[in-house]
Image: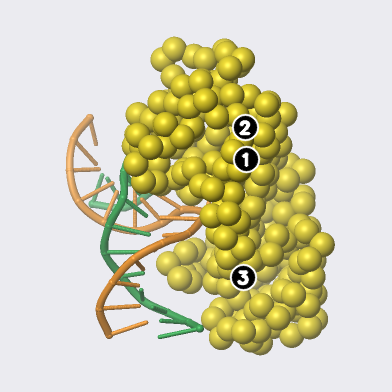
Chain colours: A yellow, B green, C orange
DNA sequence: ATCGCAGCCTGTACGC
DNA sequence: TGCGTACAGGCTGCGA
């Protein structure tokens, strides 16, 4: 579910609430959302103060006092929310709950429990962060950087865009949409993305992510697959999808039916006519 | 270096 | 109605 725009939406919400708060009690009813020992995790978290909330790609990090980083990844269905007035019973699918010193409660909800969290030293987190590709909305991400990173590989450009070490933050939805906007075939090999296509792709990535953030992300149908930030607001970007999930519908640009196929075990949609 | 696949989980949609 | 199957926004680890 959550890709860069959805994680960014959460981060902005949490940033308005969490910095300065101290965690009083941690409760982890589903231990598999914690990487490593749950006891050690709880011990580490209780009494800690959250200093800042950050995003790196799809990773979400609460900076803690003592030069520590509380890392989490939402994977397919994770959500963070803050309840100003903790509900009883706790929300559905609450996998980890943290009571805060102002009476609010921070809740990690995750239907599929593929999400994970862990407390790391700042240095360990920095090492992990350094292994990721560039942030697509930072100045360091340029058409040249993108092209150079794609050029190293004969793999399909779609697969490369999903590879977080190539560029951080794209998932299936926004990779599909960026390629459609750039008129680049998902099957084209990275090494065969020339300067013109790299420029278009770079612009498409930046635009699609920025616009999606402006719409609070993308919510799709179904219950648990719905993206919603901690206010329950639905992401509105779905209305702007051009290729994702639109098999057999006319390409908004040229009218040719959009095709679906599978790459690296993931669905891909593209226009066979105007994406080359 | 790259690939294809299984696995981690749960829920939904769909066909019979 | 029930049951089986495929699929879902991510990522890792394995053998080849």
**Which numbered disc, 3 or 2, marks the residue that appears first in the sequence?**
2
* As drawn, B11 above or below A231: below
Q: Can residue A213 be seen in this view?
A: yes
Q: Which residue is drawn at 79% across and 74% down?
A: A143
Q: Spatial distance from mark 3 to mark 2, Cα to Cα?
A: 30 Å
Q: Residue at x 61, y 15 (%)?
A: A102
Q: Is residue A173 left or right of residue C10?
A: right
Query: Would you name the residue on which mark 1 appears?
Result: A63
Q: Is residue A130 left or right of residue A139?
A: left
Residue C6 x %, y %: 34, 58
Query: Would you name the residue on which mark 2 appears?
Result: A50
Quadrant in the picture for the C terminus of chain A: bottom right
Q: Which chain does the numbered disc 3 sit on?
A: A
Q: Which chain does the numbered disc 1 sit on?
A: A
Whether residues under marks 1 and 2 lie with C-beta atoms below 8 angstroms apart, the answer is yes
Disc number at residue A166? 3
């Amino acid at each position: 579910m959550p890709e860069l725009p959805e994680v960014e939406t959460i981060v902005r919400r949490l940033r308005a609430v969490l910095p300065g708060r101290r965690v009083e009690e941690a409760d982890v009813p589903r231990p598999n959302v914690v990487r490593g020992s749950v006891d050690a995790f709880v011990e580490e978290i209780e009494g800690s103060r959250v200093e800042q909330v950050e995003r790196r790609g799809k990773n979400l990090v609460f900076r803690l006092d003592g030069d520590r980083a509380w890392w989490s990844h939402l994977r397919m269905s994770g959500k963070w929310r803050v309840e100003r007035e903790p509900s009883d019973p706790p929300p559905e699918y609450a996998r980890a709950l943290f009571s805060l010193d102002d009476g609010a409660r921070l809740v990690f909800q995750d239907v599929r429990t593929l999400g994970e969290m862990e407390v790391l030293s700042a240095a360990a987190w920095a090492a992990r962060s350094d292994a990721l590709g560039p942030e697509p909305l930072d100045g360091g991400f340029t058409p040249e950087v993108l092209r150079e990173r794609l050029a190293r590989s004969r793999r399909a450009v779609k697969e490369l865009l999903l590879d977080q070490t190539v560029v951080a933050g794209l998932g299936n939805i926004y990779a599909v949409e960026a390629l459609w906007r750039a008129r680049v075939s998902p099957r084209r090999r990275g090494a065969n993305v020339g300067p013109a296509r790299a420029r278009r792709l770079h612009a498409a990535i930046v635009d699609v992510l920025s616009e999606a953030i402006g719409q609070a992300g993308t919510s799709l149908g179904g219950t648990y697959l719905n993206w919603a930030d901690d206010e329950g607001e639905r992401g509105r970007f779905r209305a702007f999808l051009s290729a994702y999930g639109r098999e057999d519908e006319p390409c908004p640009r040229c009218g040719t039916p959009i095709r679906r196929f599978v790459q690296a075990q993931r669905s891909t949609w593209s226009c066979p006519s105007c994406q080359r």
